[in-house]
Amino acid sequence: MLRPGKKNLLTDIEGLRVGQAQEMTLNSGVTVVTADAPFVASVAVQGGAPGTRETDLLAPDKTVAAVDALVLSGGSAFGLAAADGVVTALRKAGRGFEAAGHKVPIVPAAILFDLAAGGDQNWTDNPYPALGRQAFANTATTFELGSVGAGTGATTATLKGGLGSASLQLPSGYVVAALMAVNPVGDTCTKKGHFHAAPFEIEAEFGGRGPDPEPDALDLPKSKLTPGAATTIGIIATDAELDKAALQRLAVTAHDGLARAIVPAHSPFDGDLIFALSTAKKPINDPVADAFLLGHAAALCVARAIARAVFSATLTPRDTRPTWQQKFT
């Protein structure tokens, strides 16, 4: 049986650090993933309403070989400016792509819509660059789950969303892990509180309730069906040495986990996006079998991370929805 890494977090991938910052008056925040050295990354978008920055360069045929950080942010289009703060911090640290004698940090970003999460949006200067700088300054090898970072103001159809993570140690020695900011049009659990991801749960990591004995999957799903008001975004990571093409395929496969954990998923009003990254610490031994198992593990980690995000959410004064803990414990 596959088992989680030591922390059951994205930072079970050696060398990765995660930083978070949130502003509770905004009911929003930012999550940053970085490492001591640039890393290879790609992306797959399966939702109909994404919000992104510098994702085109992650295609296998594009020139840039590695990136310095990835950003997940609330704030809708305003949140894309969080990457500016991260770029500034990286430049001060001497990081970046060498171009005509200048260091240019490469920081792809994705956003979710949390402007209707009860926060005070009456600001004049965009707060997200400062949140990006703060999140980068907070990067560490451990981090909190739930109502933090990009998951601060996230919601599902009926509950608070949040930020979740999960990892797996493969028999081959590779580690795979996911980090997800969960803010879908649909829902992550049945009306009785059983998570759709329950068949993939390990060690009661999101409550241990198991699958719903009377699932309501064939009922009309609950949703917050408002154009532009959703999106689940995340990152799948591994220490297996994968190039951009292999990482793009890993990101596509990881979306299977999103569809297992959220009903419905990949709607026209979700911007569902998953980045995939590799620290390339461990060489691939079997290109066929390793790729197969890495993809399977990625989907499992995404599903578990989504459930852990909602399970870990905590109440804040400006919330518009209850937490899972409030409603089902």
Image: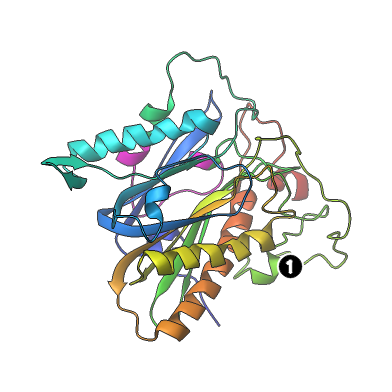
Residue positioned 41% across, 58% down in the render = 42
Image-based side of 105 in relation to 297, left or right: left
Crowding around mark 1 (Cα neighbors within 10 Å: few <14, some 14 to 19, many 20+) is some
Q: Quadrant of residue 176?
A: bottom left
Q: Quadrant of residue 89?
A: top left
Image-based side of 276 in relation to 36, left or right: right
Residue positioned 47% across, 74% down in the render = 294
Task: Tell which of 13 and 249 is nearer to you.
Answer: 249
Q: Quadrant of residue 193?
A: bottom right
Q: Percent x, y for residue 102?
A: 14, 39
Residue positioned 62% across, 49% down in the render = 47
User: What range of the chain is rendered magenta?
Assistant: 133-150
Question: Which residue type does callout 1 highlight?
Answer: Gly
Q: Percent x, y for residue 302?
A: 56, 61
* Magenta stretch, overall SS: loop
Residue 171 seen in the figure? no
Q: Percent x, y for residue 49?
A: 61, 42
Residue that label 1 marks = 210
Task: Tell which of 166 and 63 is nearer to you.
Answer: 63
State whether residue 60 is above or below residue 272.
Answer: below
